[in-house]
Image (cartoon, coloured by chain):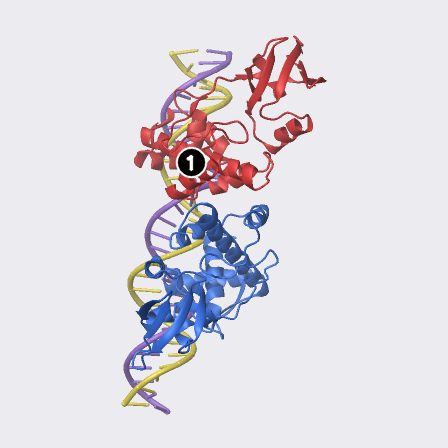
Chain colours: A blue, B red, C yellow, D purple
Amino acid sequence: MTLAEENYIKAVYHLESKYENGVPTNALADKMKTKASSVTDMVKKLAEKGLLVYKPYQGAFLSEKGRSHAIMVIRRHRLWEQFLVEKLNFNWDEVHDLAEQLEHIESDKLINELDAFLDFPTHDPHGDPIPDRHGQIQRTDKIMLSQGVCNIGYQCVGVNDSTPNFLKYLDKNCIGIGTKILVKDIEEFDQSMTIKINDKTLVMSKAITSNIYVKKI
Amino acid sequence: MTLAEENYIKAVYHLESKYENGVPTNALADKMKTKASSVTDMVKKLAEKGLLVYKPYQGAFLSEKGRSHAIMVIRRHRLWEQFLVEKLNFNWDEVHDLAEQLEHIESDKLINELDAFLDFPTHDPHGDPIPDRHGQIQRTDKIMLSQGVCNIGYQCVGVNDSTPNFLKYLDKNCIGIGTKILVKDIEEFDQSMTIKINDKTLVMSKAITSNIYVKKI
DNA sequence: ATTAAAATTTAGACAAATCTAAAAATAATT
DNA sequence: AATTATTTTTAGATTTGTCTAAATTTTAAT
């Protein structure tokens, strides 16, 4: 399985949650930063290989084989991210692109030993669950902070957007995985939210609060 | 710099010690497990990029730029090997192919942090020196065991052949980096050598002894 | 010094992954 | 329902790294 193929499979996996009746060609082209015509070609090839099911003009679905492969790529990605932050002093906003490279290294022994070396982490530095060696993904019940209710306390458990810009914003405001957040007020007009973190008050737009995952405490 | 280019540069680097007045096309083809015509094409491209100097029918030499790049690839390769053995419980005969993949991951921060994490090792699991972050290679004065003299004690400092088969032979006979070896006898006819390791006597062919590096103790 | 052998290069072709431009199918709108 | 707009696919071209087969250059041998 080539690098490009693996990246397509992973993209389809991530898009499937948004497009339940088939991932459209354009959505894939967008995610892969390529052209729709290239996607059509690739999707046909992956369908021939049995990694996904594809009906022209209808969109693509992962097959079981494709899905389990995608999950293994995600496992590798998240374990490497955890390694970089935990052992090599990387910040959580620096690891994504590097993990995109490392996730394609092919060796079961490597990834399982790395897993053990890191003490079988269940979540990566952004709070995303790490599939275990059998592809099992531990699902946590999280909500978007934008769904939060006034005067209820929450704890940050993850982020939706893992781009450096967003993560740097969180760093600047002392928000990380585990941070306790109390919702003080929600402005009706634009859903902007006033929250309290360690007695500090902060106002966040909906663009921000809908990219932070929390759970009730 | 692509994966294929990096592999060619590294191959030229390794072959230069054997072919001082130009690495022949066929030697490179052999090492790269490809055809001479492919090598000609690639060597031309690398010459255009200023990574090596190439005169038709004469062979290839690395430029300074090419050499320093090759050394960095070797640094990455050997650091990863050290990591796999030191931290992830790999045996020294299992790491080569995997390091061939890992050596192409592009990130200075990654490799320098890995270096620090491993406590700045000077040698990899096969006894080969690890270039430092400036490309400096610590050279040790080693000889082939086949050059050894009767009744002199040596210590194993490295191997020439790092293929699993050879390394497994060494494991089986309890020979590793640091093992003390006393040369007891050399058969004139075929240069086979009788040695003593921890009071155990062992006979080795020249094919073996010329792949073990030692220094006097 | 010719000729034969070996090594190297050129020419033309191929597979993978992409692109542009044009054609076809589906969805939306009047 | 017919027309327009959007999405998707096809056709043909490009780049990278490889191949085979033929031509060329260098080296070795008579």
Q: Nearer the viewer, residue B136 or B188?
A: B136
Rendered view: D5 above or below A168? below
Residue appearing at x 46%, y 60% in the figure = A8
A82 vs B72, left or right, is: right
**x, y percent for residue B134:** 36, 31
User: Which quadrant is home to the C terminus of chain B?
Assistant: top right
Which of A76 and A156 lies nearest the eye of the viewer? A156
Residue B38 at least partly seen: no
Label 1 Cα neighbours within 10 Å, binned few <14 / some 14-19 / many ≥20: many
Is residue A200 rendered to the left or right of residue B151?
A: left
Element assignment for label 1: helix
Q: Quadrant of residue B162?
A: top right
Q: Amino acid at mark 1?
A: Val
**Based on the displayed image, in which of its 4 quarters is residue B53 positioned?**
top left
Q: Position of residue A94 (x, y in %)?
A: 38, 52
Question: Taking A5 as reference, is C4 above or below it?
Answer: above
For this rendering, which residue is in front, C1 or B148? B148
Residue under the point 55% across and 67% down: A139
Provide residue B99's location: percent of width, then percent of height: 51, 39
Q: Which residue is mark 1?
A: B73
B77 w.r.t. C2: above or below: below
| Residue B117 percent across, percent down from the top left | 46, 39
Subunit that carries the residue with mark 1: B
